[in-house]
Image (spheres, rainbow, N blue to C red):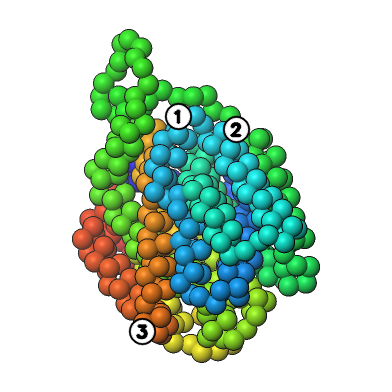
Amino acid sequence: MCSRTWRAATSRSPPTRCERSSRCPARRRVPALILAPFRVKSFRFQWPADLLASLAFEMETVILGWYVMVQTGSVLLLTTFGSLLLLGTLASPMFGVLGDRLGFRLMLSTMRAAYAALAALVLLLTLTGALAPAWVLVVAALAGLVRPNDQVMRNALIGETIPPPHLMSAVGFSRATMDSARVFGALGGAALSTVLGLGPTYALVTTLYVASLALTFGVARRPVTPDPVETWRGVAPIVAVGSPSRGRDLLDGLLYVLRSPQLHAMMWLAFLVNLTAYPVSSGLLPYVARTIYLVDATGLGWLAASFALGSLVGSIITVLTGGPRRPERSMLIYTALWYLVLLAFGNLKSMNTGLPALLLAGFVQSVAMIAMTANLLAASDERFRGRVMGVRTLAIYGMPLGLMSAGALIERIGYVLTVSGFSAVGLLFTLFIGVKWRASLWPPRRLPSGATPGTVRP
């Protein structure tokens, strides 16, 4: 579905007199519209499955990140741990190809079985007293081969099962799932590991993964589909031929993105925020908690939860309001605001001011990323949706590059200069992307038929 059709389906006209009345049928239908994605049986299984998986992700990241920081005291090893968790971003386009071919339920089920197995391995190492930072890095590398692509499957499955008018609401619910999991996962993981220890906490993490896997089996099953590229190229094969290679599938997905200015611009913006924004917002928080704010694991949990709570508020507001009217513009504006908040956060020395800054950063980040995801899904042909989201996840490879660069720079020039530099570079390139692709990301407002500029109210 093209972006013009999607904007027409989600645009809102000024309320009528009836709609302003509490007895208006249209107003009574608003809650039903908000909850419309849950009319789809597949989404009723996908949403709790994604919630449990995200909760386990966040608990695992906080627990093991703090473990590495305390055991080694090295910011470079901490950023190495964070980078390994994103190792699979290089394979994300291929995951999208496999999802398009084999079905997203099969892919999600296989991936979540792998998460449960790795969590059980960490639990076993903990109970036997064999856990060490080296083992944590090995497990992070194995999990990182698969975990970054979980969101690819989630988003593509939403695009496949949810009707277009309810797409923004479904994406907002999906985002709220991750954000709420980050809040409770960060606080719960830090608190439980402090009170109960690593073993019992990891038993809970393993249980969450197993429950998520069980719910994933209820997601819609889609039959294996034929290659869509021949139709895209205008070729209708008459005779059956062998399946095209995965390499050609991947190349066609990349070419599809490059030939769409809107998709191309959003991919660069996604890479930019992963390179310069997310390392500051999340990856460096264990270092900030231990070295800058001088707090323990509980303090780290509050820092991570503040950013996640801001994201959750942004997701809820998006669900309730239906999202911004011009999501392309909102994506750019809120990304720029995100960098400004991070610039201020890097110069704060107290938890009392750092927590509100992270809360605000999470909010603007959420609005920007929901708008980006909805734009990507709306601007992508349904036959290429998995491949497009796979290419989108490839942009996450900017985060390990940013984390490793930040770790090296902090040891050389210090934390404040590193964060300030990352924020300034991100802001400048956001403006550059907005200017270079302004025709796609900042289109002029279209006047109603028969109207003149002087007769249209702003």
As drawn, the residue found furthest toward the top would be 239
Q: Earlier in the sequence, mark 1 or mark 2?
A: 1
State the CA–CA distance, disc 1 to disc 2: 15 Å
**Residue that mark 3 sits on:** 413
Q: Residue at x 34, y 63 (%)?
A: 272
Q: Residue at x 40, y 84 (%)?
A: 414
Name the amino acid type tagged 3: Ile
Dot label at residue 5 = none
**Residue that mark 2 sits on:** 220
Residue 359 seen anywhere in this rendered image of the structure: no
Q: Residue at x 49, y 48 (%)?
A: 145
Q: Nearer the viewer, residue 342 or 75?
A: 75
**Quadrant of residue 402 in the image?**
bottom left
Q: Position of residue 134 (x, y in %)?
A: 56, 61
Name the amino acid type tagged 2: Ala
Q: Earlier in the sequence, mark 2 or mark 3?
A: 2
Q: Residues within 10 Å of mark 2 (few under 14, many from 20)?
A: many
Above or below: residue 343 compared with residue 191: below
Instruction: Tell me the element at label 1.
Output: helix
